[in-house]
Amino acid sequence: MELLISSHSKAYDIWSITYYFLHKNWKSVKVYLGANGEDKKEFVPQELIYINKGEDKSFSNSLMSYLEEIEDEYFILMLDDFVILEEVNNEDIKKAFDFIKSNKGVYLRLAPNPKGDIKINKDFSLIDVKSKVPYITSLQMAIWKKEFLMKLLKYDFNPWEFEIKAGKTKEALENYDKFFVTNYPFVKYTHFIEKGKFYPFIKDLCKKEGLNYNFNREFINENQIQDNVIKKLIRNLIPNKYKNSIRKLLKKEEL
């Protein structure tokens, strides 16, 4: 089982936080840290397999270079600002790998964020790619088929473009019945960075764990967090297949 943390050298200051909670809550997983740009090897936790291929030209280009080191056909991709909140059950992860392989899938999101559209069984749902629902290729933690992901990265999308456009490409539509999501979190995690700023909760979480960390970035305003929560609650009330139609009526870009 291989897991790739996609990062870049400028994020070296948060690696110790990400690693601490990953190491605490997830055993028996082989972890790579891909971080192009200036070599920051001295900040890489010893247990991680460090990948640095030089200049960080773009999100897609760098991620493609990290994938050259991944040996397995299917692997887990996570971003560098995720903290694992509870112990991961490797039996659940094995179940997810078995499911995506047996269904010849290309993508399996390990938490329902966004949730699936067509329920398959108590554990998994299909993402309705044909309806072009939002965030088909969300960068939430997911199992990817390496070969397929490499095809999408050739479009050289930035992270935002990747999440909203990669799932609407020719390659995605040709594999419309191969995108899946779990019906409940197989991995309980959250992100702790928003637009380069810390969410306030991470300071208390690190203190609780006795993790001595120098918070040298700004923190997000509490009012902004509340606004984001309200907007998310409203969005969740609308079925996925109608969201982009509504955005189109409002003359907003599709997600």
Image: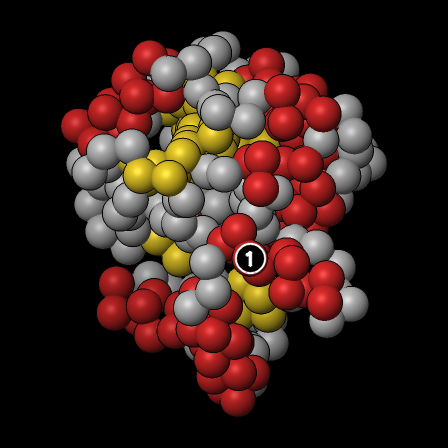
Q: Is residue 192 left or right of residue 182?
A: right
Observer able to see residue 151: yes
Q: Quadrant of residue 116?
A: top left
216 or 202: nearer the viewer: 202
Q: Position of residue 123 (x, y in %)?
A: 23, 36
For residue 39, side relative to residue 131 (left or right): right
The type of residue carrying mark 1 is Tyr
Where residue 100 sits, quadrant-wise, is top left
162 to the left or right of 44: right
Tell me the quarter of the image containing the C terminus.
bottom right
Q: Residue at x 17, y 28 (%)?
A: 91
> To which residue does mark 1 refer?
242
Query: Residue shown at 32%/68% (left/top)?
Result: 205
Helix, strand or loop status at disc 1: helix
User: In front here: 236 or 99?
Assistant: 236
Q: Is residue 101 above or below residue 132?
A: above
Q: Nearer the viewer, residue 178 or 2?
A: 178
Quadrant containing the N terminus is top left
Identify which residue is drawn at 67% across, 22% down.
171
Question: Does residue 15 appear in the picture of this structure?
Answer: no
Pick the residue in front: 44 or 124: 124
Q: Residues within 10 Å of mark 1 (few under 14, many from 20)?
A: few
Give residue 29's position: percent from left, percent from top.
32, 27
Query: What percent of the width, then of the height, locates residue 219?
Result: 55, 77
